[in-house]
Image (cartoon, helix red, strand yellow):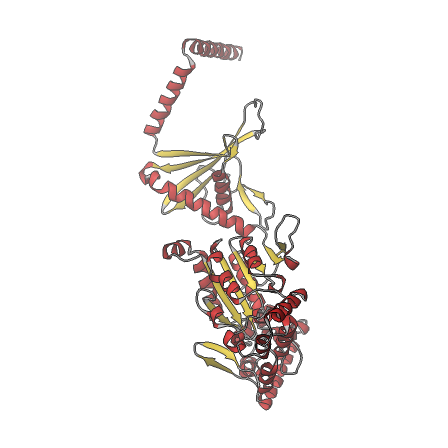
Amino acid sequence: MKELWTSLASLMGVYAFCQTLLQTLLPPELRFAFLKLFARLFNSFSSHCYYDITEIDGVNTNELYNAAQLYLSSSADSISTPSSSSPDTRRLSLTRAVNSSAVTFGLSNNDRLVDVFNGVRVHWEHVVTPRQTQTFSWRPLPEEKRGFTLKIKKQDNPPSILDAYLDHIMERANEIRRKNQDRFLYTNSRGGSLDSRGHPWESVPFKHPSTFDTLAMDPAKKEEIKADLTDFANGQSFYQNTGRAWKRGYLLYGPPGTGKSSMIAAMANFLCYDIYDLELTEVHNNSDLRKLLMKTSSKSIIVIEDIDCSINLTNRKKSSNSPARNHHEGLSASAAMAAAAAGDQEGGNSITLSGLLNFTDGLWSCCGSERIFVFTTNHIEKLDPALLRSGRMDMHVFMSYCSFPALKILLKNYLGFEEGDLSEEVLGGLEGVVEEAQMTPADISEVLIKNRRDKRKAVDELLETLKRKAERRSESGGGVMRERGSEEVVVEDEEQEKRALESPKLGGGDDVVQESCEKGEKDDNGKPN
């Protein structure tokens, strides 16, 4: 043993002497040239190309490193397979970023992962090494040097796929960030005031649980809407190539309680977009409306609910002969200006139909990208045709009374019933009366919620409620559903039509419009919805 230690000490002495001699005889430039030559010889005999992605690029953080880390960690269990030479690939570190609602899986130190892109196997290694003693720096560096080593076989022609692969990583990372981060619901500040940051929008976290799976709606119609939303979100190149602004408009119309607001929440959760709930009564003029639009972010849904009740934007043809218009036409110019000033003092606004049209389809609507405009109304016939045309409201979605497919979704959501849990007799009874009863999903949900502890009682009471509703509508000759052109509309009964015709359309301010809307939003029992 003593001879072994003596030989080892002699070898170490010889190594130290040779190292000192080489440093003395060979200048640093020559040593660097030898190392460079050795690296070239190694690369020439290697069957792979190597690419390094470091965490710190000089003094700045490398965005590509962050994107690669998020892409690989979030995809570790879905698209990747462990390398045969790395038995510890399944050890992953858990991270949760600020303002994130999801936990991501990070690669452990010096771990390896294999990804496949366009049929090419790409090997990744997370390299972590201790950093040498730091010199003085205005920005302290981490104690460890972190980076990724990307390895691709030469026979796969790495330069031909590298750019596309890195672009794919960046896009995928941005998508993951958007899905993981918290979403917000915005509303415009009262009277156009600004918040502490100088923004006209106030926000709260958006936690609405509505999804397309829970939405009580015909499944075929839901799939059509989901496909349209997916095509829109993935259509950046299409909109650029066709010279169109990257935006889309949806009009949700139908009786109260049919799920228009739940549809908006489901769209936001499906696309992972923020929602801007625009209250038109708090906007003074068209200029303020444009400023609000400029302060919205991309990948968002801009909503105007009950647009027929917000301000006077009714059909110009119908409103041209209204008593209010004839009254103002008979006034002198000074009297008309005084009346307008009085309206402003009472809280009115001067938003015009032209201003709203430019908001949704004018030049100012193109100041951002990937936006969706959603209008809701209970009375589509009251809207000006200019608001309904393609380019402003591209897709009209009729939110109807509860149908039998939608009823089965409610039974599954509230009572947990699956296919086969209910007898054919019960299902046949529900199917026979649900269309005739014309109850909204909100009304049916209330019956199920009230009796959710007793499933059998809930189904029996729902069946009795639907039968009574159908009989009452049959006896009173209630409204029926018909088609006008390519759109479905709900024909109100004679009494509601009479009240709608007698109620003033203009000249009464927002209170008169709101009163008219409230009168039109009553169920068959005369109770407001």
Q: Is residue 455 visible?
A: no
Residue 276: percent from the left, percent from the top?
57, 58
Residue 373 is situated, as x and y percent measured from the top left of the image, at 51, 62
Q: Position of residue 139 (x, y in %)?
A: 58, 29
**Quarter of the image containing the C terminus?**
bottom right
- Quadrant hosting residue 211: bottom right
In front of the other: 118 or 460? 118
- Residue 14 visible from this viewpoint: yes
Residue 213 image offset from top left, x and y in percent: 54, 65
Tell which residue pokes out farthest to the bottom in this image: 475
Number of marks in the image? 0
Image height of 198 relative to 442, above or below: above
- In the image, residue 220 sits, relative to residue 188, either above or below, namely below
- Give 308 or 128, whichever is nearer the viewer: 308
Residue at 61 percent across and 45 percent down: it is 98
State whether residue 336 is above or below residue 121: below
- Closer to us: 445 or 127: 445
Q: Residue at x 63, y 62 (%)?
A: 282
Q: Nearer the viewer, residue 259 or 197?
A: 197
Which residue is painted at 37% across and 34% down in the image?
49
Q: Is residue 498 above or below residue 289?
A: below
